[in-house]
Image: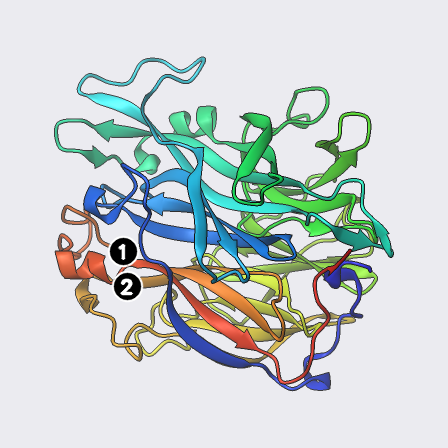
Amino acid sequence: MVPLLLTLAGLAPGDVPAPVLEPAGMLIRDSTLAGERRADDVVPRHACGLQLARRRWLLVYYTHGFRGVDDERSILYQLRGEAPDGPVLREGFFARVVTDWKPDGVPPAPPGTVYFKQHGHAVAFGVPKGALVGGRPAPHANLFVAQWRVAARVLDVQHDRLEHSKHHPDLLARTADVEWVQFRLNDAEDDLEIVQPVAKLRPRDGRLPAGVAWMNQSFCAPVPADERAEAWLVCNHFDRGRLAVLNLQYDPPSRRYVWAATSPLLSDRAALSEASLARLGTDWLLSARTSGAIAWARAADPRAAWPAVRLTAEPRLSAPHTTYRCADGVVRLFGGDRDASPQKYDRDPMYVWDVSATGDGVRLSNRRVVFDTEAQRLAIRREVRPRVDFATLFPPHGREQIVAFSVTPRGYNFPYEGTAIPPLTAADKAASGLYYVRVCYRHDVPPAWSFE
């Protein structure tokens, strides 16, 4: 069987009935791991999901604190049975928080502070154990990759407060990077086995592409590039607001994935970041965040040079967005829109649009609410600015797909400098966590994989 993302021809939104969106509550409310629980003033945020075997699923997520902006902590996993929201069989760490990090080549932290190593924006990919590709067992089945961004932040030890990264741009430039780990499902199918330990994501020669100083991770998981799912593509962003597509290729001699090639860098007058990559039949569609809008580009070969980007008037946002090709073949964009929001806020509600790629650009239609904290009556005060962001689409399970997303306040444990946002309360934090919505299709959709 050909992987799902290659089986559908990139249908126009009007060709299929719109799926039903069903809010389902919290997907992960708390971790069981010491130091990463609600009792530790930490909540789950931003998960991706993938199928490991016929009856095994994996959720990879990071934890989030309230000590300052982007208090991203550890990378965790949950092995689940039967379904992506099925029972948790095992929970563990891929990468643990480092409170007193001493990165190579970086001067010591200022007196009274330490460097705190962030881990965030985890994504994962791979062919499930026992999966058939092209009707035959895949030699690279049961090999998976997880990757995430890292960076150093200055932590005021006495006040347990993270200083904003904008105050330390040189530190961010020296330490922003992406790490990866490769693993398999064990024979008992009750835990993971690491086959390549955590390391910096690098090409074969060990160096970032020429002219690149640092790299940050896409919010979206890599997408299979060929019918055998031996190559996977992801669009990361780099210093000076540039993008490039990474080709992560299965290497038979080493039985590992390698960073085999990189597209030419794509840049624009406005900085580009946080890119998504989706298949459009024989073409590919890229969306990226820029100042107050979404930038789009379309190409036949994502590993070659991309054309200049074009902006769409809708949505208006300076916040995360993600673009996916859904199981019914329709490409959809998830994000906020300050013009559409009753609060004029680009992180609440979260919307979804159908995306059509036309000869002269991109058209968005059929905007619908995915999640609205006011409509859901979440007990987060309006003055701490609830955020609904980082939508991730899981592979289909039957007629459904999960869209997971984070709900957290914009505030933290201290008054937010330069704003009227007060410190958080216990009630604000209790409603924070990793939520999900079921995308329920009205007709059968192709399974992501077939199995022996």
Q: Residue at x 55, y 46 (%)?
A: 123
**Could you tell me if the residues under marks 2 and 1 are in contact, i.e. CB atoms within 8 Å?**
yes
Quadrant of the rendering where the N terminus is positioned: bottom right
Residue assigned mark 1: 410
Q: Amino acid at mark 1?
A: Arg
| Residue 375 x/y as whole percent | 31, 80
| Numbered tag placed on residue 47 in the rendering | none
Q: Nearer the viewer, residue 190 or 96?
A: 190
Label 1, residues with CA under 10 Å away: few <14, some 14-19, many ≥20: some
Q: Earlier in the sequence, mark 2 or mark 1?
A: 2
| Residue 318 x/y as whole percent | 43, 58
Q: Amino acid at mark 2?
A: Pro
Left or right: 27 in relation to 128: left
Left or right: 433 in relation to 206: left
Report the residue that reaches farthest toward the front. Answer: 188
Q: CA distance from mark 2 to mark 1?
A: 6 Å
User: Residue 110's image quarter?
Assistant: top left
Q: Is residue 240 visible?
A: no
* SS at mark 2 in the image: strand
Which scheme is used to colour this image of the protein?
rainbow
Left or right: 225 in relation to 241: right
User: Residue 5's image quarter?
Assistant: bottom right
Q: Residue at x 32, y 57 (%)?
A: 29
Residue assigned mark 2: 386
| Residue 16 x/y as whole percent | 69, 84
Numbered circles on residues, count: 2
Quadrant of the rendering where the C terminus is positioned: bottom right
